[in-house]
Amino acid sequence: MRKVSKPAPNISSLVLHFFSLLDEGEMSGTLLERNVGVADSTISSWRLGRRSPKLLNFEACLNALGYELIIKKR
């Protein structure tokens, strides 16, 4: 099992949820980099709270994990 650093406390709940899915799944940041083209260092910077994901990259990563981002009325 790979060692996973804990996400920074200042990131959005959507990004936190993304990391819980990534950490539970079979895909690593390195595989996302290969499959989606988002650098592993970029994903690490999201986790550390240094950068926020661009929407297109975030959606592409979610799609690679088998999820989609949707908007629904409350």
Image (cartoon, rainbow, N blue to C red):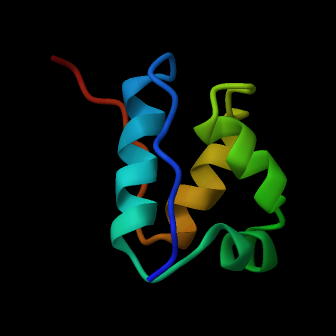
Image location (x, y in percent) of residue 60? 64, 58
Q: Quadrant of the C terminus?
A: top left
Asked if residue 53 lies left or right of residue 72, the reply is: right
- Vertical side of 17 occupied by 30: above or below: below
Asked if residue 59 lies left or right of residue 73, the reply is: right
Image location (x, y in percent) of residue 27? 53, 78
Q: Quadrant of residue 61?
A: bottom right
Image location (x, y in percent) of residue 19? 45, 50
Image location (x, y in percent) of residue 67? 40, 62
Q: Using the image as rendered, state which of residue 6 and residue 31 is in the foreground.
A: 6
- Vertical side of 14 occupied by 26: above or below: below
For the point 68% across and 79% down, the residue is 31
Q: Using the image as rendered, state which of residue 38 and residue 72 is in the foreground.
A: 38
Q: Quadrant of residue 53?
A: top right
- Vertical side of 45 occupied by 43: above or below: below
Q: Using the image as rendered, state which of residue 66 and residue 24 is in the foreground.
A: 24
Residue furthest to the left: 74
For the point 82% across and 53% down, the residue is 41
For the point 50% across and 16% down, the residue is 10
